[in-house]
Amino acid sequence: PSRWSYTLSWRALDAARRILGSWAPLLARDDIDSWVSPELENLWYQSLREHGNYLKKYHHFQGNHLITEMNALLLLSKLLQDTPDALDWREYALSRLAKELDKQFFSDGMHRELSNHYHRIALEGFLLAAEIAPEDIVENSKWRAAWQALRDITQPNGYGPLNIDGDLEYNRMILDEYT
């Protein structure tokens, strides 16, 4: 569409989730040529490019939806790296992700919501970007501070603090896996 759309087909978050959860795993398969005809492949790549251009232009302005949408755009730039828009998508997504990382976390690494839950959710949202572009995300001082803050607030039993209702979550697993 040439403007914002909230239909199921073009709502930005749904478009992003389609890329992240369905299309990217299919494109990564080694046997894709054996079950996708050239005609379908052409239509699929055309649709992927349309999704990329849409996400770049019509995305959320902030928050976890923006992170998901920019992760999809960043992943698309990697999957379609030979297309003319790929570098532009990558640079745009990384720029927005860096700004969002800066908005979501204080300089000491704590999430602005001051909640263990939101701290984890935000960090988990940036994990895909950190895998695709570690030099842009992992090297960010806010990223490192946020992980350190999560380690610091985690109790010896592995749980984070219960600072809002329903916030008691096990942090040890994510800390063990990603730090």
Image: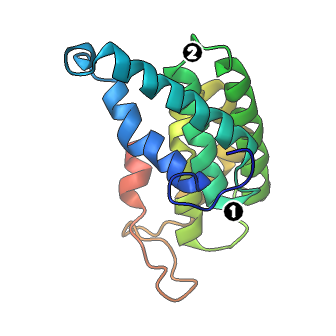
Is residue 37 or residue 151 the one in the foreground? 37
Instruction: Read off the residue under disc 1.
Output: 110
- Looking at the image, residue 44 sits to the left or right of residue 150; the answer is left
- At mark 1, the secondary structure is loop
The amino acid at mark 1 is Met
Residue reaching furthest to the bottom:
165
Is residue 59 or residue 64 the one in the foreground? 59
**Disc number for residue 81:** 2
- Looking at the image, residue 74 sits to the left or right of residue 131; the answer is right
Q: Which is nearer the N-term, disc 1 or disc 2? A: 2
- Looking at the image, residue 26 sits to the left or right of residue 64; the answer is left
Q: Position of residue 54 (x, y in %)?
A: 66, 40
- Would you say the residues marked 1 and 2 are in contact, meaning their CB atoms lie under 8 Å apart? no
Mark closer to the observer (1, 2)? 2
**Disc number for residue 150:** none
- At mark 2, the secondary structure is loop
Residue reaching furthest to the top:
82
The amino acid at mark 2 is Gln
